[in-house]
């Protein structure tokens, strides 16, 4: 299964890594490790997480960070639509679907 990032989701993800790293050395790396663990879970079972927007968009929370990966599974591909902060701009990513 391949992973595809919406361009805005990729930008959000990279900005978050950089922001955490500027706050404390190594924190961006820990965020990235948490993100990669979530991707491993998605590869193993993309339907593990509940649907948050019909018909097929799901939310996978990152452990220890206030972010979730918003995604959908389309055949052999996982499409990441957003890397969304839990308290900022709820559902802003819906137009990306």
Image: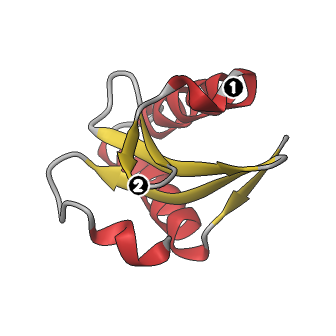
Q: Position of residue 41 (x, y in %)?
A: 63, 23
Q: Residue at x 60, y 75 (%)?
A: 7
Q: Secondary structure at mark 1?
A: helix
Check the image and report above or below for 96 versus 19.
Answer: below
Q: Quadrant of the N terminus?
A: top right
* Disc on res. 77: none
Mark 2 → mark 1, Cα distance in angstroms: 24 Å
Q: Position of residue 3 (x, y in %)?
A: 75, 50
Q: Residue at x 45, y 64 (%)?
A: 12
Q: Nearer the viewer, residue 93 or 23?
A: 93
Q: Position of residue 57 (x, y in %)?
A: 48, 51
State which tag comes first along the sequence, 2 or 1.
1
What kind of colouring is applied to the model shown? secondary structure
Q: Secondary structure at mark 2?
A: loop
Q: Residue at x 52, y 50 (%)?
A: 56
Local packing at callout 1 (Cα closer than 10 Å; few below 14, some 14-19, many 20+) is: few
Q: Position of residue 38 (x, y in %)?
A: 56, 29
Q: Is residue 21 left or right of residue 77?
A: left
Q: Quadrant of residue 48?
A: top right
Check the image and report above or below for 32 versus 17.
Answer: above
Q: Residue at x 59, y 30 (%)?
A: 47
| Closer to the eye: label 2 or 1 | 2
Residue that mark 1 sits on = 40
The residue positioned farthest toward the front in the image shown: 55
The residue positioned farthest toward the left in the image shown: 87
* Disc on res. 54: 2
Q: Nearer the viewer, residue 25 or 91?
A: 91
Q: Quadrant of residue 6?
A: bottom right
Q: Is residue 5 left or right of residue 50?
A: right
């Amino acid at each position: 299964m391949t992973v595809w990032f919406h361009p805005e989701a990729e930008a959000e993800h990279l900005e978050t890594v950089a922001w955490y790293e500027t706050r404390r050395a190594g924190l961006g790396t820990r965020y990235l490790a948490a993100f990669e663990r979530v991707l491993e879970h998605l590869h193993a079972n993309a339907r593990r997480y509940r649907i948050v927007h019909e018909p097929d968009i799901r939310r996978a929370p990152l452990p220890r960070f206030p972010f979730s990966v918003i995604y959908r599974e389309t055949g052999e591909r996982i499409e990441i639509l957003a890397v969304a902060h839990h308290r900022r701009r709820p559902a802003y990513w819906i137009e990306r679907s």
